[in-house]
Image: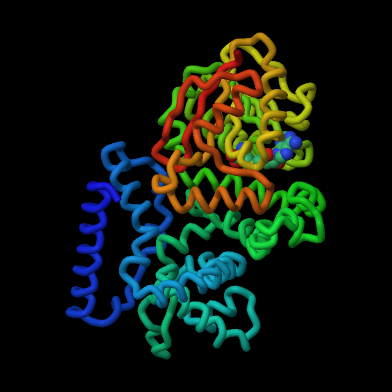
Amino acid sequence: MGHTSTVTALSVVGIIQAVAIAYLVLGTAPAPRQVDEASLLRDWSQPPPWPVFLPANEVLQFSDRLPGLVYPPSIHAMSVAMMFMRSQLFYTAAKLDFAESLAAGPLTASELASASGLPPESADLTFRVMRALVALGYFNEGRPCPTTGLPRFSNTAVSATLRRAHPNSIRPMVLHLTEDTYLSWGQLSRQLSGEGVAFPLSHNGTDFWDYLRAKPKQERQFSNAMTAVDALGVPATLSDYRWGSFKRFIDVGGAHGSFLAAAMRRFDGIQGVLFDQPTVIAAAREKWQPGAQWGDVQSRAGLFGGSFFDSETLPKGRDGDVWVLRIVLHDWDDEESVAILKSVRSAMGSARCTLTIVEASLAPTVSGTHASRALMDLHMALAFEGKERTTAQFEALFARSGFRLTGVHPTRGIFVIHEAVPV
Ligand SMILES: C[S@@+](CC[C@H](N)C(=O)[O-])C[C@H]1O[C@@H](n2cnc3c(N)ncnc32)[C@H](O)[C@@H]1O
């Protein structure tokens, strides 16, 4: 651990000790409080200045290792083994729309069960679910019911992100991760043992993309989950790169086109092209109608269905294009990624185009890697045989597909932008 990390570690441990002492001195638990639901819908996605972002990011990275330092080892190990319960609990709250039901004000467990369409006999289990969600800090215990004295529950800033009206709503991603990929994680040891890829192992041999094609509801939810990725830093991605210097933005594998729409809103001279599989584009068209979600920029956009493995179905390159692959290559292994890039290179032809790969890429060293990025890398392996990559790995892909790396642009969100040009 370097000097800076040691200092950070000591100060974080110091803060925790101070909070623990204050907790013991002032009482046992925070008193139930009233929450202003409207204030929980604040848009927090604007990035902080770099001098704030960089140290905050260090602290966040360190905080993943913090429980291992402050808990006795066996207690920490037990809590790690129980982590899956948290994601299932949070998923259940998302699925049953608890955050939405609580938006009008605090409810007792039986009121919440009834507002969520659950049978009356579920009131007790709803209470126990909410007690666990409050204990974890995901929901809040509001003031008790004035007539019965029973505990009432309300939202926190975290649970409010499950609401549809939240500007950074994460609900579709919570539903997708649990419904479509949770089972795959149970197969990690089998994948390591060489028995196959976890997703097909847990889905009767079907790979992820065929599974989605066979389940239109899940495919739509997956595209909505991709829109929810915007909550993790679209303003930062748009601020921290020179998107405004291009004439046309081609979003390859762009799902429903939320990132494209955000770019077109921000840079009003730019033309847009959305490219994805035909079924995905068919669903996206509804959102690009005049008067619909991205209707305000539809007159500058074209939507095309095809396959990025077939360059003939891609649009033809023009001078001043930026071709964007946001969290696309991480779904694919190196051979498939090279095939996609070759296809894009061929569609660009002799036009002066720029390629940008927008991904949560990896640091070159083990100790410099954020836990969330290392986990996402494994998630890609289990779901798609894909991977997150370092700059050196992107460079190697570019070298094999007719591109040259011209820049690496970190952003104040989760993404790093790797820029390349045709050679
Ligand atoms: C992980 S999502 C990323 C979506 C979007 N770029 C974003 O950042 O929100 C990958 C996208 O690749 C699309 N895709 C998968 N196979 C494809 C293919 N053969 N041709 C075109 N798009 C494809 C999927 O439909 C999906 O929308």
Vertical order, 225 against 99 (above or below): above
Determine the image quadrant of residue 23: bottom left
Q: Is residue 70 left or right of residue 296?
A: left
Which residue sits at x=33%, y=77%?
A: 32
Determine the image quadrant of residue 281: top right
- Find ligand 1 in the image and state its quadrant: top right
Vertical order, 283 against 42 (above or below): above
Q: Is residue 14 left or right of residue 142?
A: left
- Between residues 199 and 255, which one lies in front from this camera angle? 199
Which residue sits at x=51%, y=28%?
A: 418
Residue 179 visible, this angle: no
**Could you say where residue 12 lies in the image, as x and y percent from the top left?**
25, 59
Q: How is the image coloured?
A: rainbow
**Could you say where residue 156 lies in the image, as x and y percent from the top left?**
41, 65
Vertical order, 383 against 187 (above or below): above
Which residue sits at x=65%, y=44%?
A: 386
What residue occupies the far top of the structure in this picture? 350
- Between residues 192 and 322, which one lies in front from this camera angle? 192
- Between residues 28 and 104, which one lies in front from this camera angle? 28
Which residue sits at x=55%, y=33%?
A: 393
**Could you say where residue 355 lies in the image, as x and y percent from the top left?**
57, 23
- Between residues 224 and 296, which one lies in front from this camera angle? 224
What residue occupies the far bottom of the structure in this picture? 148
The quadrant of the rendering that contains the C terminus is top right
Determine the image quadrant of residue 179: bottom right
Residue 321 visible, this angle: yes
